Amino acid sequence: MDSLITAAARALAVGDPLGALNRVALRDDPPALALRGIAMAQLGDLDRAKALLRRAARAFGPKEAVARARCIVAQAEIALASRDLGFAAKTLDAARATLEAHGDPLNAAHARYLEARRLLLIGRLDAAERALAALDAAPFPPALQAAHALTAAGIALRRLDTKTARAALTRAARAARNADIPALTAEVESAARMLTTPAARLIERGAERLLLLEEVEALRSSKALVIDACRHLVRDGNTVISLARRPVLFALARALAEAWPGDVPRAALIARAFRGKEADESHRARLRVEIGRLRRILAPLAEISATPDGFALAPRRAREVAVLARPLEEPHAAVLALLADGESWSSSALALALGASQRNVQRALDALSAAGKVQSFGRARARRWITPPVGGFATTLLLPPPLPAG
């Protein structure tokens, strides 16, 4: 490896893509192409970066398996940055194995980190944690230590484990300072703000207030009966009943919880559960059926009794009833939550992360676009969607994976 290639690689390692390009911009040999691709990625020109790395991978000969594997890892990192979450995990895993077999533990670890990050973005928290646990970050350079800690913090935040998240973010901040890469420091600071911005609303006895993530975590372990409108479940201690697939029943449960300790008139329940339809005898009959179903499902946690005007909720063990609601009520909140990271997403990547059909995600994007809440650029398969971050709110509770039962 010649001195210019070495100097360019060192410039990229400290986040100086312009310095790297000054050394290799006019060269077309495979190592220079690879370094130019990484530099363009750091500058934000991801399409150009992909093209350069593909050229580099093709240009390396059959005896240069390590160099090709490094190009594959770099392409995977660009795919992750551009939220192309469908990139071939098997290809990345094969590249990691090649790097390990040829004595390149640093890039092999980076490949494993990228897979952990991808698993986190699509909500597979257990798999992401296993991938991260296979890495010992101690011998890594500061930049990779910070990335490792950021991923650990992301997993903990999604699980509402604020103590673990805070410790991981402290490690990430220390490593980012040692790395002295401004973009990395900004990413750590952005993640840390999740702990100090409102994450949900608490509705209790007719009053509302905003909660931080730490307060949401405390609510989960309290003695209250919690109707969680972020995950569509009902919780009392360690007992959790999911109503995620029963939207009518959840709407009734939330209406009863918001009115507790009072009751809710039948007409109000019909309007809430059946989308504002005027009450007639058929709706009243359907309400009786749905209340009967809800009564059976919630029997371990609460009793639902008829009153002269409507129905009332009475917890069996809990002393209080609380509704945990999203900080912003929005029909397509999960889509906005993913877009709020400031990166550009394709509709296919959003569908993969949400576990939804691409058609439903596209409908949501069209509705949000018509309302001026998201913007798109590009055409056909290159089309990407972006929105500014949701100001003043943490979006952890808007994301789709269910909260753990314990």
Image: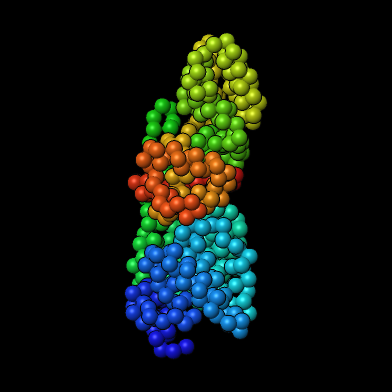
Please determine whether, in this image, residue 58 is positioned above or below residue 338.
below
Tell which of 357 and 204 is nearer to you.
357
What's the image's color scheme? rainbow
Identity of the residue drawn at 55% across and 42% down: 359
Residue 36 as seen in the image, left or right of residue 308: left
Is residue 343 found left or right of 92 in the rendered image? left
Can residue 138 be seen in this snapshot?
A: no
Camera-side residue of 162 and 48: 48
In x, y percent, where is residue 150? 46, 62
Where residue 97 sits, quadrant-wise, is bottom right
Relative to 6, residue 136 above or below: above
Q: How many marks?
A: 0
At 61% from the left and 67% from the top, the residue drawn is: 91
* Residue situated in front as seen by the camera: 185 or 74: 74
Q: Is residue 254 visible?
A: yes
Q: Is residue 215 left or right of residue 103?
A: left
- Determine the residue positioned at 58% across, 36% down: 244
Which residue is at 47% across, 68% downward?
51
Report x, y in % for residue 3. 41, 89
x and y percent of residue 220 in the render?
52, 42
Position of residue 334 measured from the top left corner of the image (x, y, whole percent): 48, 43
Q: Where is 92 relative to 216, above or below? A: below
In this view, the residue in front, 198 or 6, is 6
- Quadrant of res 58: bottom right
Residue 297: quarter of image: top right
